[in-house]
Amino acid sequence: MKREELMVAAIKNGTVIDHIPSSKLFQVVRLLHLEDIRHSSIMVGYNLQSSKMGHKSIIKVSDKYFTDTELNMLSVVAPNVTLCIIRDYEVVEKKCVALPETLTGIVKCANPKCITNNEPMATRFKVTDAEHGVLQCQYCEKEQRVEDVRLV
Ligand SMILES: [Zn+2]
């Protein structure tokens, strides 16, 4: 095992979210609602040395497997994360995240006049160009790029 992996203890069963840009760590925590998890232990490694990225962050959640829908939300803030599904200390599956077709209640609309910025309601975006990361508001039709989005 590589030294960088040893900096955060191994988990027996659960999910490892690796290669998170350190500046995005807390957004990832929010998107997965980790603050609401009561029955799992969560280990976070912040700003670890990474040969690939310089510095990265990593989250390990014991006894928790996320749905693809939950994981794909991460693509909005951290498109290059790697996900490892762990069972009995072994990596049984590796996944990447992909932009979902729609994003509900995740991203703010960039149009200040949009109804979603003026009424208490969930935003809704359609991914019109997944390759280039273009989203379109379903209410006012304003387009924005995924790298510019602000989270709700
Ligand atoms: Zn809008």
Image: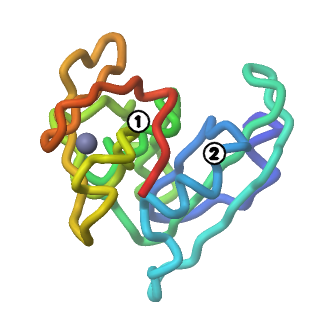
Report the side of 141 relative to 135 (left or right): left
Q: Amino acid at mark 2?
A: Lys
Q: Residue at x 21, y 37 (%)?
A: 137
How many residues crowd mark 2 within 10 Å: few (<14), some (14–19), many (20+)? some
Q: Position of residue 82 (x, y in %)?
A: 50, 34
The circle on residue 24 is 2
Q: Which residue is mark 1?
A: 75
Q: Position of residue 131 (x, y in %)?
A: 31, 11
CB under 8 Å between discs 1 and 2: no
Q: Residue furthest front?
A: 113
Q: Residue at the far top: name it.
A: 131
Above/below status of 39 relative to 17: below
Label 1 crowd bin: few (<14), some (14–19), many (20+), radius 10 Å: some
Q: Which residue lies most toward the bottom here?
A: 38
- Please, what is the three-letter code of the amino acid marked with disc 1? Ser
Where the N terminus falls, by quadrant? top right
Q: Nearer the viewer, residue 84 or 150?
A: 150
Quadrant of the rendered image holding ligand 1: top left
Residue 100, image x, y percentages:
22, 35
Specify the quadrant of the image occupied by residue 140: top left
